[in-house]
Image (cartoon, rainbow, N blue to C red):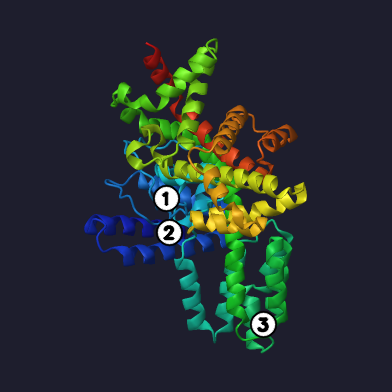
Amino acid sequence: MERHYLELDRLWQTVQRQTSGDGDEEWRVGIQNQRRDLLKKIRVLGGNKAADSAVQKQHKVRTTYENPQPSTTPSLGSAQVMPSSETVKQPLGHLTKAILDPVSQDVDNILVSYNLTASAALENAKIAHELILDPEIHLKIDPTREKLTDSFLEHVKHDTRLVMQKLYAEMCTVIPPSNPMRKLLDTEFDTQWIESQHENHVLDVPSKLRLVLRVIRSVCAPMRDEAVDKLVEQVDSVDVLRDIFVLVRQLQADVLNYQLDAVVRPWLRKHAVAYEREKMAHMLESQDVELTTAWMQNAATRVHAEQPLLPRGDFAKQVFREAFLDLCFAPTAVEVQNVPITLALDQARIQELQNEIQVLLSTGVLCALVKGTCKMNDTEHLAVAPKILACLQSNDVTMDRVVETVVEVSGKHSMDQLVRKTLSKDSLAYRAMENGLRKLIIAQLGKKDYLNSPFKAELTQLSLSVVHTNICSLVGRIDRLSEFNWQVHVQWYAKINRFIFN
């Protein structure tokens, strides 16, 4: 079985050489599906060690290929990411072969379900970047699995034995051998036992399905409990089988997303800084330093004037943070053509931060306006904020809609001009709140304690306590992005600061 797994990889390499990647999608999908099924069977029969051994041997075999091809089979594939925007510009650069630690094998075992490997995740800057910087983003699980299962069920729906075997195989992917319930599954779904029950006309399918649902209930997240309960009630229904397979796929996704957070993200954080630094090094060195200093020039001048005694290392980092916030608080959107080269992967993310800052500031200043005009108490004030925030966050927001919302929550039709004036570029209230928020954020960067009470008290002084949770999330994302970017490009930023003051 292991030999067959390796032979399929050799077959893919041959196909790639002969077709140069053109028209080989059908081959790719077929080989991919066969290899995935084989790896599952190897894991079921020999455990995780056997599966790990097969993957390791595959890596060794690939080093012997005369001209290895960058395939998209499960071991070298590229995965899809769900970022909020697809406009992130990827810098090009020469990559040396990744030197991965033993933990990367665990990462490989997880990423195989995403048609990806540890080394491929590192080499694809966009994937690694998104996974590290946005904890809400997850990879899409290969959709062909669901289609294959549906097709399988359609073809074998009258063969109960095959359906039970398939269900058992799917359950083995989420119930490890160490789980006490696994032994029960192994016994009840033993092939010979199922065959014997079938031959003697005593195969109780509803009973098997109840067992499966009981096992799922013991390991699933609480949000799946309701779905499990419904299926238990419908266990005698003809259509329940497909719904159980859907539930198992959801459970597989839950497990993979947990492993993504617990294993893959920490591993990427450990390796990605050095990897991105290497990829960008030759690009940065080929740039004229003078042409890449403009975005930091004003920040350097301000920091030098306000804190002239800062040590050089602290000075460079403070300049970077101020310059980064200059981008986030810029009145116009940061576009691809004017984003600093060291932030090329984050242009879309910076635009999102810009938009969120404007939304939260607008919410705060409008809530303060309504509270002052209508003499609201704190409870009434807090009740107003979600409605104004929802209006400002909507995709089709206009000034007229904002005015309508404020009029609705305040009950005053005379608010039209006040709202427009409050949100204008010349609004003193808006600018004062903006400057205050910026000072709060710069003071919190690197501290990791922006959920504390003093921070909330400072937001209250700025009339921003109504969006306290949103601002804490905002500060966390700014801190995460700026800190990671600083780690990657610290040498370049230090070079820029030396150039500015020479």
Residue on which disc 3 sits: 205
Report which quarter residue 390 is drawn in. bottom right
Residue farthest to the bottom?
Answer: 201
Decide: is 470 above or below 39: above
Q: Residue at x 42, y 46 (%)?
A: 59
84 or 270, which lies in front?
Answer: 84
- Residue 295 position by quadrant: top left
Q: Residue at x 44, y 35 (%)?
A: 99
In the image, 407: left or right of 485? right
Q: Nearer the viewer, mark 2 or mark 3?
A: 3
Q: What element carries label 2?
A: helix
Q: What's the residue type where badge 2 is placed? A: Tyr
- Furthest residue to the front? 414
Give the left or right position of residue 229, taking residue 87 as reference: right
Q: What element carries label 3?
A: helix
Q: Where is residue 353 in the image (x, y as percent from the top left)?
A: 50, 42
Whether 101 is drawn above or below 12: the answer is: above
Residue topped by disc 1? 58
Q: Is residue 46 visible?
A: no
In this rendering, the answer to whether 494 lies above or below 138 is: above
Q: Determine contact: label 2, label 3, CB under 8 Å.
A: no
Marks 1 and 2: in contact by CB < 8 Å? yes
| 183, 115: nearer the viewer | 115
Q: Residues within 10 Å of mark 2 (few under 14, many from 20)?
A: many
Q: Earlier in the sequence, mark 1 or mark 3?
A: 1
> Which of the numbered marks, if any, corresponds to residue 369?
none
For marks 2 and 1, the one nearer the N-term is 2
Looking at the image, residue 278 lies above or below residue 184: above
Instruction: Name the spot of residue 97 as percent of width and height, x first.
Output: 37, 37
How far apart in space, not on screen, are marks 2 and 1 (Cα)? Answer: 8 Å
Disc 2: which residue = 5
Depth check, mark 1 against mark 3: the one in front is 3
